[in-house]
Image: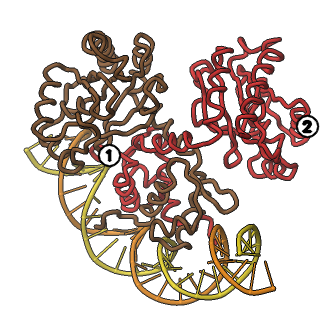
Chain colours: A brown, B red, C orange, D yellow
Amino acid sequence: MSEYPVGATHTTGRIVSALEGGREAGVTELAGELGISKASVHNHLVTLERLGVVVSTDGRYRLGLRFLDIGMSVRDGMPLYAVAREETKGIAESTGESSALVIEEHGEAVYADVERPERNGGRIRLGSRHPLHASAAGKLILAYRSRETVDEYVETRGLDRFTDRTIQSRADLRDELRSIRDRGLSFDRGEYSEDMRAVAAPIRREDRSEALAGALSVLGPAERLSGKRLEEDLPGIILSAAKRVELDLSE
Amino acid sequence: MSEYPVGATHTTGRIVSALEGGREAGVTELAGELGISKASVHNHLVTLERLGVVVSTDGRYRLGLRFLDIGMSVRDGMPLYAVAREETKGIAESTGESSALVIEEHGEAVYADVERPERNGGRIRLGSRHPLHASAAGKLILAYRSRETVDEYVETRGLDRFTDRTIQSRADLRDELRSIRDRGLSFDRGEYSEDMRAVAAPIRREDRSEALAGALSVLGPAERLSGKRLEEDLPGIILSAAKRVELDLSE
DNA sequence: AAGTTCGTTCGTCGTCACTGAACAGTATTT
DNA sequence: AAATACTGTTCAGTGACGACGAACGAACTT
């Protein structure tokens, strides 16, 4: 079995990825870039347009908002989102900062809900994906995973460095994860972005199984998130919110 | 040329659509439903999982949030969104109601931005798609299109009926569109949902070309949107906001 | 008006996407 | 505890069709 059982779908995926971010491109452009024949790229684009996910205007193509529609329908269908929604909002209201519901997907931390995204400098938005080892919520998710799973993560994704503070060694990661598990709380003090801080609390499953259901997180600029506020006030708020979500989830 | 030049991609699209709304399904289930062999469905799902858009847990499959990520990146990349964003927010703040930026795509009204979605009863959310003839913004978009384009819309999509007030005949639609063009303003008084009201104002392009760039809209329950507020106050607010967007857009 | 781009269309070939059937687990039933 | 009835997955064969290179036609540029 090859890497991608359905090659044509793989090609479609590559074309879609190339058009991410609302980029508008022509057939020849894409064909050259992806190393696919013009005719083939054209066929894929026409198919995608008929499916309603691509729009074309006089020969140039771009992704439409159908992706957003599908994505929102998926998000709204998540049981955890329905349960955590009000708490996420509540955190943003009581703190005045960005708050988020984060889940794990394909080895990444994914933001399934973000309240007040404008308060984090536009760095994190709904649907954002970040490496697990370089965010408060991501580390939290890793902390509740088995050692093998963590090792596998490090091997396949590596410990990409974003700032001086990004965890760089497996040993450091292991120490940090233990400390997180002990406290039931996770901090990010500029490990992904120099001037950003975050606190995250775990949402465990009813059966207390290994993997977390998700994490709640508060995030914002270092100038507002520091000292006692970062170390004591926010942890208190977010921990109790996460506990309430856990309870609601088990009903 | 067939309907879909790349058949495999079409199949993938059908599978994805079947999984919309966060539905979790098994291979056999999908195969039976779509009339495709189990093996084929399996191949598509494995491919989609490798591409990172599908997640599987012990044999059951569902869409992941990658769609949301792509969709948000497309939305954030829209020039109109960047320009209209603050005005959309402003409308929601000054009215306390849901406000939206709406564009046309594949013959549907698409909500590219929705502020305070909770204030419209959860009926309209980011990425929602509605028929053009049964919403304030949709009718507005049709109103600035050529007669042939409108005829084509009616022929291909038909005038689906949602409430007693939904426009049912081509003649009524023509009259309504003329009136909208004359006033430069569009109302929805329960044409899509019995107890919903909306007002929309056009965002024209600099070159004054036929097609609108989009529309701004306020929407909410009939109990709050009625009388002078619906007929005079909201139109004033939304018209001036749309005008400002038009100006910003032409810079 | 010749030239250069583009998107699109056209056949042709060789591959691979689809099928039906066998396999391997797991849950349910008896 | 054995048997049944579901799953999801793998397998091998084949015929449709996806990929390619080339030709086409339209739209700008020169």
Secondary structure of the residue carrying tag 1 is strand
> Which residue occupies the foreground of this view, A219 or B201?
A219
Q: Is residue A220 above or below residue B18?
A: above
Earlier sequence position, callout 1 versus callout 2? 1
The part of the image, by quadrant, that contains residue A99 is: top left
Badge 1 crowding class, 10 Å Cα cut-off, few under 14, some 14 to 19, many 20 or more, is some
- Residue A251 seen from this side: no
Q: Which residue is mark 1?
A: B56
Quadrant in the picture for the C terminus of chain B? top right
Could you tell me which chain the residue with mark 1 belongs to?
A: B
Q: Is residue A99 above or below residue B12?
A: above
Disc 1 to disc 2: CB gap under 8 Å: no
Left/right placement of residue A156 relative to residue A87 reads left
Task: Quote the CA–CA distance across marks 1 and 2.
Answer: 51 Å
The part of the image, by quadrant, that contains residue A214 is: top left
Residue appearing at x 53%, y 71% in the figure: A40
Residue appearing at x 11%, y 31% in the figure: A175
Residue appearing at x 39%, y 54% in the figure: B48
Q: Amino acid at mark 1?
A: Ser
Left/right placement of residue B39 relative to residue B182 reads left
Instruction: Count the labels in the image.
Output: 2
Q: Amino acid at mark 2?
A: Arg
Question: From the viewer's perspective, is the residue at label 1 or at label 2 nearer?
Answer: 2
Q: Which residue is mark 2?
A: B178
Residue appearing at x 60%, y 20% in the figure: B121
